[in-house]
Image: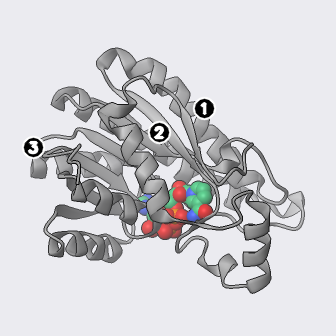
Amino acid sequence: MTQRFTDRVVLVTGGAGGIGAATGRAFAAEGAIVALADRDLAGAEATAAAIIAAGGRASAHAVDIADEDSVDALVAGVVAEHGGLHIAFNNAGVPTPILPTFDELTPEIWRNVIDVNLTGTYLCMRAEVLALRASGGTAIVNTASIQSLRASAGQAGYIASKHGVAGLTKAVALDVIGDGIRVNAVCPGFIMTPMMAPAVAVPEVKAFLEEKAPIHRIAEAEEVARAVLFLASDEASYCVGSLLSVDGGLAI
Ligand code: NAI
């Protein structure tokens, strides 16, 4: 297998499962030292153990990305443990329930999804950029969404948060390209992960999602991971502030 990330230190948030765990495994398979961070520490530890059992290198870290001190401690801890930071994948996020009416979007639901998905991504980039500059790091990839590019009813909070991640990705890309750091994002469509599991467990909903995607299936997390590794690699040397759809044609 190609080894694009030999000895690169890669931080992955949301590394306990789903897209984060699949991407952590893919980075490790190409030689990276992967720091898996999640508010679910046991889940991150399980991902790290599986990587190590497969012959890779990984560590697990607890973090709440919505908390500035927690994020700063995470990045400092990863740098102290592994000697630097070269690539970051900001992927942790939360969904919101699909609400029947806009009136049911409470300030509590709004603040939580904005705090985690948008402010959390900002706090991570804030700390990571300093560490990447100090280490000669080269890339940040954020997880945006199909919901960064379009909208659907009942999810105003989530959609606002993910449109925010898209804007943040483009703006910070301009701010740090002079430091040799490329910032990009993936925009996943329907991906089979723990976040999607409750919806996909309902046969009618699964059939609806498969029908809606032009490719007529739900993706595996590994299919997003491959796009993340491309954006993080030197192969994407001219990608700056790009939003790469991995959605089976949904956003077309
Ligand atoms: P997931 O639920 O398996 O992964 C999300 C991870 O983020 C979980 O491990 C969770 O513990 C962690 N997390 C949540 N809040 C956190 C916080 N405050 N601090 C630290 N960790 C936190 O689901 P999935 O699908 O792998 O989600 C990954 C990303 O992909 C999310 O940003 C999600 O919004 C996005 N996404 C997922 C899609 C899908 O169809 N599964 C589609 C489009 C985007």
Q: Nearer the viewer, mark 3 or mark 2?
A: 3
Q: Quadrant of the C terminus?
A: top right
Q: CA distance from mark 2 to mark 1?
A: 11 Å
Q: CA distance from mark 3 to mark 2?
A: 23 Å
State how many labels appear.
3
Q: Nearer the viewer, mark 2 or mark 1?
A: 1
Q: Amino acid at mark 2?
A: Tyr
Q: CA distance from mark 1 to mark 3?
A: 31 Å
Q: At numbered mark 1, what does the secondary structure look like: helix, strand or loop?
A: helix
Residue 92 appears in the rendering: no
Residue at image coords 72%, 77%: 206
Q: What residue is shown with label 3? A: 83
220 left or right, relative to 101: left
Q: Going from the N terminus, do you reach mark 3 or mark 2 first?
A: 3
Point out residue 142 in the picture as x, y percentages from the top left corner.
47, 43
Q: Going from the N terminus, do you reach mark 1 or mark 3 first?
A: 3
> Where residue 122 is drawn, which disc sits there?
2
Residues 80 and 22: in front is 22
Point out residue 65 in the picture as x, y percentages from the top left corner.
42, 53
